[in-house]
Amino acid sequence: MSLNVMLLAQELGRLKRVPRTGWALRGVPEPESVADHTYRTAVLAMVLGDRLGLDTDRMVRMALLHELSECRTGDIPSGAIPTEQKTALERNLARDLLTAAGDEGPYRELIEDFLEGRSREARLVRDLDRFEMLLQALEYQDAGFPVFEEFYANTIESIREPEVRALAEALR
């Protein structure tokens, strides 16, 4: 393994220790990590992509890359900075990390597609990212933290793809 890939692996390891900020701000002790969130999002992308006959490999790759920048920024909660600024930061840091590993070329288009939601696969992964958050909110609510209704109300309207919207509505 090249030194560059080793450095990327070390940076990615930080995602296991970066807590999801939204949960911490709401008093959840020891909230899930960004890596926890990314894993479930990736598996959901794999299953839904297969069921819909889409480019599942592309979806899983997007799901794995979508939080890449957070190994350097931490988890920036929604609304903490303007959306355009957060998107630019995510784009630039992802490029830096992947370039440092050797070649960001194969991943650049995936990151751009995800951030802009150009393809159906990207829109589904973006919605699954939100759906995963709703699942986590429900799990925290079941554990005694009253967060589901707040997250549900703020998230359900942003889910556009009908398959993911149906899943989210079933949580109610």
Image (cartoon, rainbow, N blue to C red):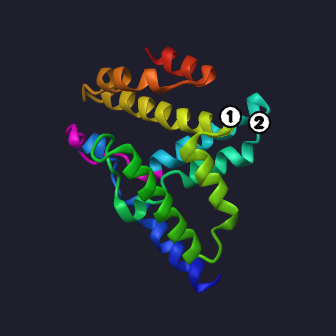
What residue is drawn where x is 73% and y is 42%?
A: 56
Q: Which quarter of the picture shows residue 103?
A: bottom right
Q: Which is the main secondary structure of the residues drawn in magenta?
A: loop
The reply to whether discs 2 and 1 touch (Cβ–Cβ < 8 Å) is yes
Q: Which kind of residue does numbered mark 2 sit on?
A: Leu
* Residue 58 in sight here: yes
Residue 120 disc label: 1
Which residue occupies the foreground of this view, 33 or 161?
A: 161
* Residue 33 in sight here: no
Mark 1, secondary structure of its residue: helix
Q: Is residue 42 above or below residue 168?
A: below
What residue is drawn where x is 68% and y is 34%?
A: 120
Residue 142 percent location from the top left of the image: 33, 25
What residue is drawn where x is 38% and y is 30%?
A: 139
From which residue to which does the magenta span run?
25-35
Q: Is residue 62 magenta?
A: no
Which residue occupies the foreground of this view, 85 or 126?
A: 85
Residue 90 percent location from the top left of the image: 45, 56
Mark 2, secondary structure of its residue: loop
Label 2 Cα crowd, 10 Å radius (few <14 / some 14-19 / many 20+): some
Q: CA distance from mark 2 to mark 1?
A: 9 Å
Q: Which residue is mark 2?
A: 54
Q: Is residue 32 magenta?
A: yes
Which residue occupies the foreground of this view, 36 or 125?
A: 125
Q: Is residue 87 above or below residue 46?
A: below
Residue 137 percent location from the top left of the image: 36, 30
Q: Which kind of residue does numbered mark 1 sit on?
A: Arg
Judge left or right: residue 38 versus residue 121.
left
